Image: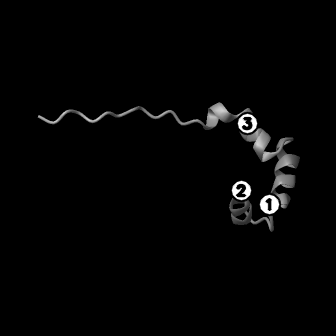
Amino acid sequence: MTQIAIDCGFYDHSAFVKRFKKFTGTTPLNYRRQHQAAFAIERPIVLPTPSK
């Protein structure tokens, strides 16, 4: 999270969290928990085919 904050131009993690909370009304952790299903990526299971 710290690297994301710095990459976005914030000087530290807490500054990012404060701004995120002001914008969304919740912390990044709570936001992630509330939207967990949306972040889950469903990938098909690909099984190898038998060699002939």
Mark 3 to mark 2 CA distance (whole Å): 15 Å
Q: Do the residues labelled 2 and 1 touch (CB within 8 Å)?
A: yes
Name the residue furthest left: 52
Q: Where is residue 17 in the image (x, y as percent from the top left)?
A: 82, 53
In the drawing, does residue 48 fall left or right of residue 2?
Answer: left
Name the residue furthest bottom: 11
Mark 2 residue type:
Met
Q: Nearer the viewer, residue 9 or 27?
A: 27
Residue at which label 2 appears: 1
In the drawing, does residue 49 fall left or right of residue 37?
Answer: left
Would you call the spot at circle 3 few (<14 residues within 10 Å), some (14-19), or many (20 or more)?
A: few
**Which callout, 3 or 2, points at the residue further toward the start of the chain?**
2
Residue at (80% x, 65% y) in the render? 12
Residue at (81% x, 57% y) in the render? 16
Residue at (71% x, 56% y) in the render? 1
Mark 2 to mark 1 CA distance (whole Å): 7 Å
Mark 3 to mark 1 CA distance (whole Å): 19 Å
